[in-house]
Image: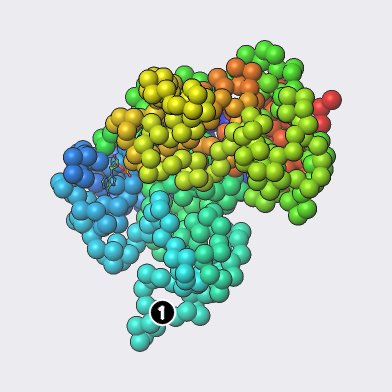
Amino acid sequence: MKRTEKASIEAGAVDGGTVLGREHGPAPSRVPSSGRPPAPGDGSGVEGDVAVLELRDVSKSFGATAALRGVSLRVRPATFHALVGENGAGKSTIVKLIAGIHRADQGSMYVNGRDAANPSPAMVRSLGIGIVHQDSSVLPGFSVERNFSLGQEPTTQLGWINFGKAREELAARAKRFGVEFDPKMPAAELSTGNRKVLEILKVLDERQKLLVLDEPTASFTTEETRQLLRILAELKASGVAVLYVTHRLEEIEGIVDSVTVLRDGTNVGSLGHDEATPHRVISLMVGRDLGEMYPRGSGEGRAEVLYTAAGINRRGSFDQVDFEVHRGEIVAFVGLTGHGSFEVARSIAGLQPPDRGTCTMAGERVRIRSLRDARGAGIGFLSESRAENILRVRSVRENLALAALENWSRFGFVDSQREGAQVRHLIELLSIRCRSASAKARSLSGGNQQKLALGRWLAVDSQLMVLLDPTAGVDVGARADIYRLLREFADRGRGVLIATSDLAEAMGIADTIYAFYKGKRVGMFPREQRQQADVLAAITGHREGEEPA
Ligand SMILES: Nc1ncnc2c1ncn2[C@@H]1O[C@H](COP(=O)(O)OP(=O)(O)OP(=O)(O)O)[C@@H](O)[C@H]1O
Ligand SMILES: [Mg+2]
């Protein structure tokens, strides 16, 4: 993928770590960078070139849904192959076919040139294929080390797993990732991010031929993503091929060799590194031209302050934090996990409220101690947990209507005609893809659920919207829709505050970025005068961000 100005990979420059973008980009690893001889046929398309994995003309339906229709795909040895596509395009179905979880209705699969259609899980392991699925496979009731050794081959002569050895291996791989795990800890106590790290550690092994990772970084911070990609680059250099599903195109641009794009269950493009410009990939993915991913605001009337926090403090979470949100402005909070960015955003919405300090909304002092207070003050809140934002078993219509009940009811009666029109309007405005307004919220794809959650707050007509990681796991088309909606919301004289773990997102969408480190606000970065490397330096404690007057 060609580099863009938003290269999140510059990240590495700060702490002297591996700089993926430089080491491997911009046109990386046509030839593997290690001393290992290039695998046969590593130059693309040469006769006799044997793919590590090849799918030929694979189809798979679930009832009436054709998830895959005649998909072919080749992963060459020691290459990084990205599999991209919108929510529901069929990516995870491919991963599950490779894992032997689903059986193909039609088509064939080859591993190193040998027929390997519909393999058993044991066969998958013995072929040297390590798979991390999109949904967590961590068993919360088991310890970290039990989870780590689960499903591994027996290693002692008696056919038992050697737990001492497994523990050593766990420690070594965790160290390589830059994390520490207490092996005895119940997995239930791990954060979502760390559960994913644990699953990934199980497959990070030079002996693998192929790693298949299905959206491994959806719940990762920038730092965790960087660590993972650094290790994957090392594995690639030692001969391991990687098939990598992601929605975040920026994160792979320094390492990717080829890209397969799925749309509605078909392969709509297999691109080499040089052809795979973000623009090309995205328009193949969504089948339309998205225009600008991150729309900029008109900037009009942004002088008027909507919300202020002065010297707010919460013991153990954040300290002496000041910031403002203007009308018409999108503000982003960035920081590593636990350093205050998410904590401050939650406190604004009444969860974990501050102990000290002053907040004002539209010039009036406010004391917000609960979500209900926040709502009363005109503050909408979208938590990072999708399940909390929508009523999953209710219909799309009910989700949109219940939130706005007060606005749409006259004398306590719901005006159903008006409701119907409003619901239709919101579905269209948000481009929510659903069979009908009576489809259950949980039947929507992830990105559409998130749009529905946003729609609930648009229906309530709040003044300030506070959102935590609003686009995690959301496909690129839906993300573009969400950014457009937030921008339109701000342009109507409202304010938006996003806490995000995706630095590229903050760089793209925010008019002002506030950086947090160790519970303190360490920098304010208006759009005109910021470099991603500076923001990253601020959140990793390497440099105080500038404080423009
Ligand atoms: N077990 C299943 N039963 C019925 N339908 C399914 C099943 N698994 C997947 N599907 C359908 O198959 C299609 C492809 O789903 P898949 O999970 O492969 O998409 P994806 O590309 O991984 O999407 P996402 O980015 O949201 O993870 C979707 O329409 C989905 O609803
Ligand atoms: Mg998936």
Q: Which residue is mark 1?
A: 161
Residue 442 image point, x, y percent:
37, 42
In the image, residue 199 lies at what x, y percent? 46, 60
Is any part of residue 363 visible from this angle?
Answer: yes
Outermost residue on the left side: it is 106
- Residue under the image location 52 percent in, 75 percent down: 167
Q: Nearer the viewer, residue 121 or 345?
A: 345
Q: Residue at x 49, y 22 (%)?
A: 410
In this orientation, which residue lies closer to the viewer: 276 or 62? Answer: 62
**Which residue occupies 76% across, 54% down?**
316
Tell me if residue 29 comes above or below residue 284 in the rendering. below
Tell me which amino acid carries mark 1: Ile
- Residue located 44% across and 30% down the image: 401
Q: Report the front residue among 462 and 203.
A: 462
Q: Is any atom of residue 451 visible in this view?
A: no
- Say which quarter of the image contains residue 330: top right
Badge 1: few (under 14), some or many (20 or more) residues near its Cα, within 10 Å? some
